[in-house]
Each structure stands twice: as C-alpha cells, then as structure tokens.
Amino acid sequence: MSDPEDHRKLHDELEREAGEMEEAGDELGEDTRAVRADWEQKQADEGVPGAEAEPEDGPVVKRREDVEPEAEREPDPEPEA
C-alpha cells in the first residue's frame, strides 16, 4: 500500500468511521441524559413503585449472605463442562 491513492482511500475511510463513531457517541450521550431525567422524575413521584430515591448515605446493598443464612441457602449449581 505504498501508492498515495491507497493511502488517500484509507484516510477517507478512517475519517468517515471516526465521524460515525462521534455521532453515535453524541446520540448515546443524549439517550443517557434522557434516561437519567426520566429516572429522576420517577424517583420524585411517590406513585412509582420501586423508584424510591437512595438514602443520603448511599444505596442499600444486600449481599446474598445477609439475606439467606448459609445453612438454608441452596448450593450454587455446578458449572457445565
């Protein structure tokens, strides 16, 4: 690929791909902002079950060990070969 025309074609193709990627990134950013706004609106609405705002000290994270005592928990399934 030492031909200047080949380099030009490669350059043009890479520029086009970069433009497409930038456009896709911008669209993703817009989607993210819209989803975040929707979620915050739902958190503010007490009529939406499961969308309560997180407590000031952060989200409540329950580990499996905290929910089921070890003796009562089903064993994890063996991975298939």
Image (cartoon, rainbow, N blue to C red):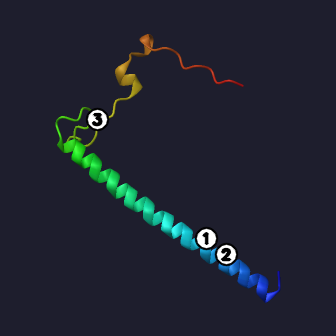
Q: Residue furthest right?
A: 2
Amino acid residing under circle 1: Glu
Q: Which mark is residue 60?
A: 3
Q: Secondary structure at mark 3?
A: loop
Give the quadrant of residue 29: bottom left
Q: CA distance from mark 2 to mark 3?
A: 48 Å
C-alpha gap between disc 1 and disc 2? 6 Å
Please tell me whether mark 2 sits on a helix, a strand or a loop.
helix
Q: Nearer the viewer, mark 2 or mark 3?
A: 2
Left or right: residue 38 versus residue 12 is: left
Looking at numbered disc 2 in the image, what kind of residue is underneath it? Glu
Whole-Å distance between the Cαs marked 1 and 3? 42 Å
- Above or below residue 28? Residue 67 is above
Residue flagged by tag 3: what amino acid is it?
Val
Q: Residue at x 65, y 75 (%)?
A: 14
Say whether marks 1 and 3 touch (CB < 8 Å).
no
Q: Are marks 2 and 3 in contact (CB under 8 Å)?
A: no
For marks 2 and 3 on the same chain, the one whose residue lies earlier in the sequence: 2
Residue 57 can be seen in this image: no
| Percent x, y of residue 56 | 19, 44
**Image quadrant containing the C terminus:** top right
Judge from the rendering whether residue 23 lies leftward or rightward of residue 53; answer left or right.
right
Q: Is residue 27 left or right of residue 36?
A: right
Q: Which residue is mark 2?
A: 13
Q: Is residue 39 visible?
A: yes
Q: Secondary structure at mark 1?
A: helix
Question: What residue is drawn where x is 33% and y is 34%?
Answer: 61
Q: In the displayed structure, would residue 13 be above or below residue 47? A: below
* Label 1 or label 3, whichever comes before in sequence order: 1
Residue shown at 61% from the left, 70% from the top: 17
Which mark is drawn over residue 70?
none
For disc 1, the marked residue is 17
